[in-house]
Amino acid sequence: MASRAGIVVTGTEVLTGRVPDRNGPWLAEQLRIVGVDTAEVIVVGDRPDDLRWSLRALAEQGLDLLITSGGLGPTADDLTAEIVGEVQDRPSVVDAELEQQIGAIVARLSAERGWQLDAAATAHAVRKQALVPVGASVLSPVGTAPGLVVPVADGRTGPLVVVLPGPPPELQAMWPLVLADAAVQSALAGRSELRQQTLRLWGTSESEIAATLRELGMRLDPLEITTCLHDGELEIVTRFGPSAQATYDSFAAAIGERYPETLFSTDGRTVDDLVADRLMEQNLTIATAESCTAGMLAARLTDRAGSSAYLLGGLVVYSNAAKQELAGVSKDLLDQVGAVSAEVALALAEGARDGLHADLGVGITGIAGPGGATPGKPVGLVHLCVSGNGRTMSRRILVPGSRAAVRTRSTVAALHLIRQLLTQ
Amino acid sequence: MASRAGIVVTGTEVLTGRVPDRNGPWLAEQLRIVGVDTAEVIVVGDRPDDLRWSLRALAEQGLDLLITSGGLGPTADDLTAEIVGEVQDRPSVVDAELEQQIGAIVARLSAERGWQLDAAATAHAVRKQALVPVGASVLSPVGTAPGLVVPVADGRTGPLVVVLPGPPPELQAMWPLVLADAAVQSALAGRSELRQQTLRLWGTSESEIAATLRELGMRLDPLEITTCLHDGELEIVTRFGPSAQATYDSFAAAIGERYPETLFSTDGRTVDDLVADRLMEQNLTIATAESCTAGMLAARLTDRAGSSAYLLGGLVVYSNAAKQELAGVSKDLLDQVGAVSAEVALALAEGARDGLHADLGVGITGIAGPGGATPGKPVGLVHLCVSGNGRTMSRRILVPGSRAAVRTRSTVAALHLIRQLLTQ
């Protein structure tokens, strides 16, 4: 049987949604890679009782490993190390060596960044961060907070608890130390490889896939298949043990046979990856002219390092004057067909392409809402166009939902239009 | 004592981070507004055992109300209604009226959107979505899935469970029906008002605030104060009952006295809100020229409806040629001082402002990394400039962390520079 883990993310700012949880999903994926299945992610506020409850509840579920993130900072609401010590029956004491180490880090950071810290306040914060449950092992700080590996007290049974800092870069940098820890390795002794594969489709509904899964029926038994819609893309994610590889391969082949037009990724690559890879392979450059998305496509095309190889630049043409002056759309055309039209999307694509001397241009114009609808042009209507390399492809979409949904979906639809132009 | 709730978000796609959890935080905030405190958000995969465990564990914690999101779709991995019925000791049966209602919705959507659905597959999916635990009340579907309010079986004690669909627009649209439900109102009878206020600072460290909180000491006792760093901004969020209002007011005043330069929001408004409000109040227009952020600032300036009142447009000047041709930066300047320099940031701001005939122009140029560093210009170095309305403000920042962190922080820093120019 596979090892199972639980993750406890602490922080009222996460519980209340002021900060999205980036640690729970990241840890779940890292655990999967080493063959550990995550049962739950629990988000709790900075309240000792709730943190204590969640650790005890997960322990009672019989998990092998618990991981906490956050609550290791210098303020009084940062309580994780102490509560974990209590739950594991190990009182916390100041680790003098660690106190020195953290003090040195804070002094160095202060000097580098020109902080003016109060000496007493700093000493207090450093001492707090050097509190370690007796018998725990310390993972060296990446920021100022150390990580901890805290076994349950001798003579009791329960999961090992790994305590990690909340800032995602610190947590991620500390992960190799977690995997190298002897107690962690021993807790994970029962692990077995768990594979995960993703199929991505654009233009197939969840109901169609549900019907296909029912038809394929019990042949799929050893696979754990989940589907979800994600900005208009349908993702099929499958987890399975190594012995089910052949079953998965025939399942993926069956999906490919049934949905040859809409299945666009079988190897985990996103539409962003495919667009970037094809632009690089074909040695093409691209430029954008965006109205309702106002830079979202250009920003997304530059998410990856090295994107200067293909994105030359873009135009954010929010006003009609900008459409005319920056992208060269004629006033007559705007007067005749309106800014939200297939004709203007084409003119924007050509304007971006020619104005920036790129191989391809992309135009996006639409009504993000909630205002701006006119007769025949409802909120959510968006025209897209990609032009260049000897081809032009246009698309009209009608996106339900909020302003944010319309803008995000338009950006994704534009990426798919680029992908399609580069594929066919 | 306040009512307390627990939230269970289902979906392997959320547990594994393919989709961020937008429901847990939203529900926690809605509950707070009606005086209900959220103890935990638990994210579980589409596995019956784990969902069952989380519902039972939360029930044992003695909460008054549990809310689930997701797992109501047409596929076999959508199991929530059935499991909730089981945990509440109420077997599920097909609700014939609801089956008809959902069938009509699916037929209408198919007609509108041109779906080609297999009739048998659709009927099966509709019947599945019409399964209702005996004794539960049904909340009318917003999409195709109904919500459910499921009391525990007669003769047992336990929390009320509210079952909501996973897509955030559907869940949010259904919320008024939840609050209007008689069983929900009765479960929340013990609720008491919980206020929440947010202070936002730009340029004050978490250690300084920790020291201030310690100095203010026990005067703060009735307040639940949490602090967090968020893209370089420090947020202090305080929750308290109505009787502690005066304590909160004096706390907020004390922060205002100690940090007059860095405290920028006391009423919940974000820097985005403040920039938009000040542009509107002062009747000013703005344009952007972005290199490393490549449209992120323009996209963020247009997140709000009505932003066409101030954002005219922008230039994404990723390549040096684009900097010259679109923003009019001289080749000599680029050769002399390099693209990442205070001089080029100023030239970009002026180029955007003049090229788009705006009152204000913003320029951003930096090294997002991981490549691109040169001697004296490390990854994370970003120059920002805002110019117009008779003033020019420049800033140089050095952002630690990933490419994404550098780009996001630069965008936030630019918003603060605009805010500062419009304030002083």
Image (cartoon, coloured by chain):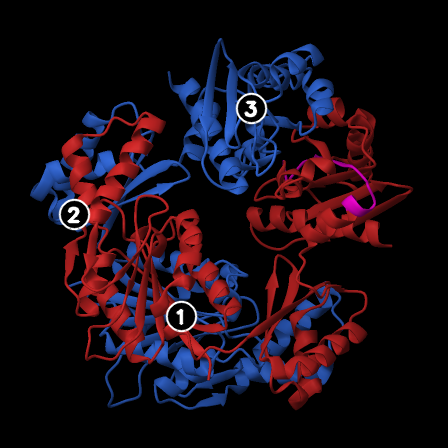
Chain colours: A blue, B red
> Disc 2 and disc 1: Cα gap in Å?
42 Å
Q: Residue at x 8, y 44 (%)?
A: A218
- Of the image marks 2 and 3, the number of the one nearer the N terminus: 2
Tell me the quarter of the image containing the C terminus of chain B.
bottom right
Which residue does the numbered mark 2 point to in the structure image? Answer: A223
Which element is circle 3 on?
loop
Which residue does the numbered mark 1 point to in the structure image? Answer: B185
Residue type at numbered disc 3? Pro
Give the chain of mark 2: A
Query: Which range of residues does the magenta coloring cover?
Result: B279-294
- Nearest to viewer (mark 2 / mark 3): 3
Q: Which residue lies furthest to the left in this view?
A: A218
Picture coordinates of residue B177 (x, y %)? 40, 57
- Nearest to viewer (mark 2 / mark 1): 1
Picture coordinates of residue B121 (x, y %)? 17, 36
**Residues at discs 2 and 3 both on one chain:** yes
For disc 2, the neighbor class at 10 Å (few under 14, some 14 to 19, many from 20) is some
Which residue does the numbered mark 3 point to in the structure image? Answer: A375
Reply yes or no: does residue B293 show up in magenta.
yes
> Disc 2 and disc 3: Cα gap in Å?
49 Å
Name the side, left or right, on which A220 lies relative to A55.
Answer: left
B250 and B114: which one is in front?
B114
Which element is circle 2 on?
loop
Give the chain of mark 3: A
Picture coordinates of residue B97 (x, y %)? 21, 48
Which element is circle 1 on?
helix
